[in-house]
Image (spheres, helix red, strand yellow):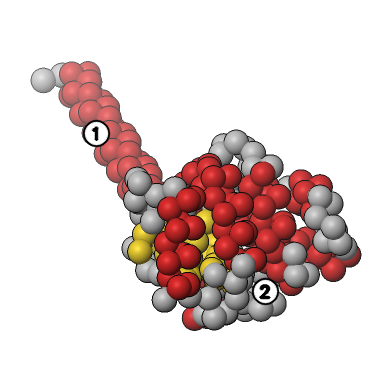
Amino acid sequence: MSEKNREGKRTARERMAAEREKHKAAEKRRRALIVGASVVCVLALAAVIGVIAANAGKDDSSDSEGPAVAPSGAQGEDSLVIPVGKAGAASTLVVWEDFRCPACKSFEDTYRSTIHELTDAGRLRVEYRLATIIDGNLGGTGSRSAANAAACAQDAGKFVDYHDVLYQNQPAETDDAFSENAKLFELAAKVEGLDTPAFRSCVEDGTHNSWVAKSNDAFRSGGFTGTPTVLLDGKNIYQDQSMTPEKLKQQVQEAAKG
């Protein structure tokens, strides 16, 4: 074999060896990129899982930071009840409500005057308990903000009047208007003597937000199916299709007779 041929074969082998090294290096870089990308994906997934875990069981209305400051005169376990009416009344009506709940407005519009008549006569005691399920279902903070404002009105001795005004002026379920302090102040102006610096500060500071969150936790753990939940002496009358304001009045009057 000539020197020229040997030199040509050697050069070809060297080129092949060089190519193999290039392929090895490229493969090594590819594997490194795959491993690096996998690590990034794992870390990203871990971060997402961490966020999900951190928010598990929460809704937008929840604000349990700080102590639960109950409104003035609140009673019952954990002071979660706002009582209205004579303490010794023969009948007790427990009303779980959400200020953004259209069904709650319907109940209030239908039964408001009858309930006022019975409480004013000393025949019925009403225990109002507040929930924020619409915030949890649709987002926003209107349920919580309205409930906090109602608790602030309770501090001022104006709960019933402000409670009624909120329902009479309830926005559409998907409209989170109650999350705006300006709206809550506008409605407070409809209640004589309520729109004061103390009330405004209570609303702006969210003084009772943690109390509202605690009340909503009690609603969720109570096994109730929705709002309103209305219990007359322990019996769910809202589920009674035959119930009317007149029938409610009759039952309360009969209980008062003993």
230 and 226: which one is in front?
230
Q: Residue at x 78, y 61 (%)?
A: 204
Residue 71, numbered circle:
2
Q: Is residue 134 left or right of residue 122?
A: left
Q: Relative to 222, does residue 89 appear above or below in the rendering?
A: below
Residue sitting nearer the eye, 174 or 191:
191
Q: Position of residue 128 (x, y in %)?
A: 55, 65
Count of numbered tags: 2
Q: Is residue 225 visible?
A: yes
x 35%, y 64%: residue: 235
Residue 61 in view here: no
Q: Amino acid at mark 2?
A: Pro
Q: Residue 236's spot in the image, x, y percent?
A: 36, 59
**Quarter of the image where one finds residue 4:** top left
Residue 182: horizontal and vertical position, in percent?
A: 80, 48
Report how far apart the C-alphas of labels 2 and 1 lie in the structure: 80 Å
Task: Describe the element under mark 2 as helix, strand or loop.
Answer: loop
Q: Against 147, is 75 above or below?
A: below
Q: Which residue is mark 1?
A: 20
Q: Few, some or many C-alpha atoms within 10 Å of disc 1 (few <14, some 14-19, many ≥20)?
A: few
Q: Residues within 10 Å of mark 2 (few under 14, many from 20)?
A: many
- Mark 2–mark 1 CB contact (< 8 Å): no
Q: Residue furthest front?
A: 257
State the residue at coordinates (52%, 56%): 97
Q: Left or right: where does residue 200 sit relative to residue 35?
A: right
**Of labels 2 and 1, the one closer to you:** 2
> Measuring 54% from the left and 70% from the top, which residue is drawn there?
123
User: Image check: 255 left or right of 145?
Assistant: left
Q: Is residue 187 above or below residue 5?
A: below
